[in-house]
């Protein structure tokens, strides 16, 4: 037989009865504007006509017999019994689309979403049948059973629930397990972008499991499992979970300040990810208000807006200038004039920094080059042993080491320029400037 559509189709039918969907799917990429079942029915009709034509032209029984099973019409006239329910490929799956639609809608009950994506986990038997079918007919024009199932159910769910299918950013992925006849939902996270301020010292940005027990609880951590009783993350978390019905939250900050540094000014950009939320249409102004009330003056959030998954990488990679206010102490008394000329040196050249000793145990030992844009002397104490300065620099500059010099690992440094030991006693971030989302 030559490899045209009708001979391929009759070869498929020779294996046994096949539904219009499964027949049409083997030629899915050939014609546009038709669904697989319409295409399959058309092919079967053409086969029936072909058989009738052949029957009137030939008395060659052998040839007729060869073609007979390929035509529904012929099968009927020859008295070959077909159980219409029993497509040998899908076992009647496509006759039960409405049952699957009902299952999907029932599973989605109570889950708030605007967009969804269908997925199918075929049974082993269906996979085997499809492989046999493809071996017979070739895969050149075929589409997988999964694709048709997803599309057909997706169309019906869209119409019934007035929700949109979305391949790229679905709120929920609906997986149909054909063998078990169950639906699994993968509810995607909800992302909320905002800025936070930190008004007290001593709280880290994120949950910090106890170093001794790794979170299980021990004497060292007073059986809390944490190094610190609270964090920015944990102050934001409870209200986000309450508003969204999420199972958990994940905190993503645009960089982090030291535990003992305040975060002031306009605040630090962050994204809080609500994991498996069952509510998405939440009032973000009210959420911010509730978070701030819960945090009780320790932190405050502002400007909450909805964000996307891809924004997480964006804020993590965003290069932003930082403005710091720092209190510095000196081992010896210094004059204002001397301090001002030492400060000038820091802005006139790039700063070379080797990863600081204090973080070397958890960061790669790298050399980085950063710039300080300006340094302003705000105040020098009357005894000349401490000062408050404001500086603006590129993100990623270690400010404490810019002052201390870190035993020569940061050059130039304020201490080295002064020729006097200097260290930061208080450090606050007052502004983070950059384009986020
Ligand atoms: Zn079928
Ligand atoms: Zn512990």
Image (spheres, rainbow, N blue to C red):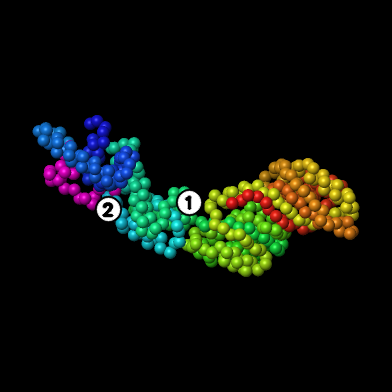
Residue drawn at 26 percent across, 33 percent down = 4
Q: Nearer the viewer, residue 400 or 223?
A: 400
Residue 206 visible in rendering:
no
Q: Is residue 164 visible?
A: yes
Q: Position of residue 424 (x, y in %)?
A: 79, 55
Q: Quadrant of the N terminus?
A: top left
Name the residue furthest top. 2
Q: Residue at x 35, y 44 (%)?
A: 144
Going from N to C along the chain, the mark reached first, 1 or 2, is 2
Q: Which-is-in-front pick, marks 1 and 2? A: 1
Query: Which image quarter: residue 191?
Result: bottom right
Q: Position of residue 418 (x, y in %)?
A: 86, 48
Task: Say which quarter of the image contains residue 332.
Answer: bottom right
Q: Is residue 234 left or right of residue 182?
A: right
281 falls in the magenta region: no
Q: Is residue 422 left or right of residue 320?
A: right
Question: Is residue 245 left or right of 271 when viewed as pictured?
Answer: left
Residue at 79% over, 45% down: 347
Q: Name the residue that disc number 2 marks.
A: 95
Q: Within 10 Å of the Cα at label 2, are there few (<14), some (14-19), or many (20+) other Cα atoms?
A: some
Task: State the SS at label 1.
Answer: loop
Magenta segment? 67-90
Q: Residue at x 75, y 46 (%)?
A: 372
Q: Is residue 86 magenta?
A: yes
The one of 201 and 350 positioned closer to us in this rendering: 350
Q: Position of residue 354 (x, y in %)?
A: 73, 44
Front in this rendered view, residue 106 or 410: 106
Tell me, for residue 424, which label it has, or none: none
- Reading the image, the residue beneath label 1 is 169
Label 2: which secondary element: helix
């Amino acid at each position: 037989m030559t490899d045209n559509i009708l001979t391929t189709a009759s070869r498929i039918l020779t294996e046994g009865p096949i539904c219009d969907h499964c027949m049409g799917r083997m030629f899915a990429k050939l014609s546009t504007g038709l669904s697989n079942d319409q295409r399959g029915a058309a092919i079967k009709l053409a086969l029936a006509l072909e058989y009738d034509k052949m029957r009137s032209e030939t008395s060659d029984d052998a040839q007729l017999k060869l073609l007979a099973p390929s035509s529904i019409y012929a099968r009927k006239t020859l008295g070959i019994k077909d159980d219409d329910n029993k497509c040998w490929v899908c076992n009647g799956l496509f006759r039960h689309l409405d049952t699957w639609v009902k299952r999907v809608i029932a599973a989605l009950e109570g889950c708030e979403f605007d967009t969804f994506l269908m997925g199918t986990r075929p049974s082993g038997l269906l996979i085997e049948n499809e492989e046999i079918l493809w071996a017979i007919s070739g895969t050149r024009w075929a589409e997988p059973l999964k694709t048709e199932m997803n599309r057909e159910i997706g169309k019906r769910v869209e119409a019934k629930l007035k929700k949109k299918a979305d391949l790229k950013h679905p709120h929920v992925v609906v997986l149909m397990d054909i063998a078990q006849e169950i639906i699994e939902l993968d509810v995607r996270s909800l992302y909320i972008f905002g800025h936070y301020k930190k008004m007290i010292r001593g709280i880290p940005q994120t949950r910090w499991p106890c170093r001794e027990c790794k979170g299980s609880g021990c004497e060292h951590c007073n059986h809390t499992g944490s190094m610190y009783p609270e964090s920015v993350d944990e102050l934001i978390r409870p209200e986000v979970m309450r508003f969204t019905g999420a199972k958990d939250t994940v905190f993503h900050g645009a960089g982090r300040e030291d535990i003992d540094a305040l975060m002031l000014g306009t605040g630090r950009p962050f994204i809080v990810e609500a994991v498996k939320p069952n509510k998405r249409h939440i009032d973000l102004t009210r959420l911010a208000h509730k978070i701030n009330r819960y945090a009780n003056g320790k932190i405050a959030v502002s400007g909450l807006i909805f964000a996307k998954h891809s924004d997480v990488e964006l804020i993590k990679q965003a290069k932003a200038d930082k403005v710091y206010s720092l209190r510095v102490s000196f081992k010896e008394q210094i004059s204002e004039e001397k301090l001002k000329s030492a400060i000038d040196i820091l802005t006139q050249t790039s700063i070379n920094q080797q990863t600081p000793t204090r973080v070397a145990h958890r960061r790669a030992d790298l050399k980085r080059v950063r710039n300080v844009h300006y340094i302003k002397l705000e105040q020098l104490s009357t005894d000349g042993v401490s000062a408050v300065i404001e500086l603006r620099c590129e993100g990623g500059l270690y400010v404490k080491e810019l002052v201390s010099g870190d035993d020569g690992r940061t050059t130039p440094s304020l201490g080295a320029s002064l020729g006097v030991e200097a260290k930061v006693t208080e450090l606050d971030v007052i502004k983070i400037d950059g384009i986020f989302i």
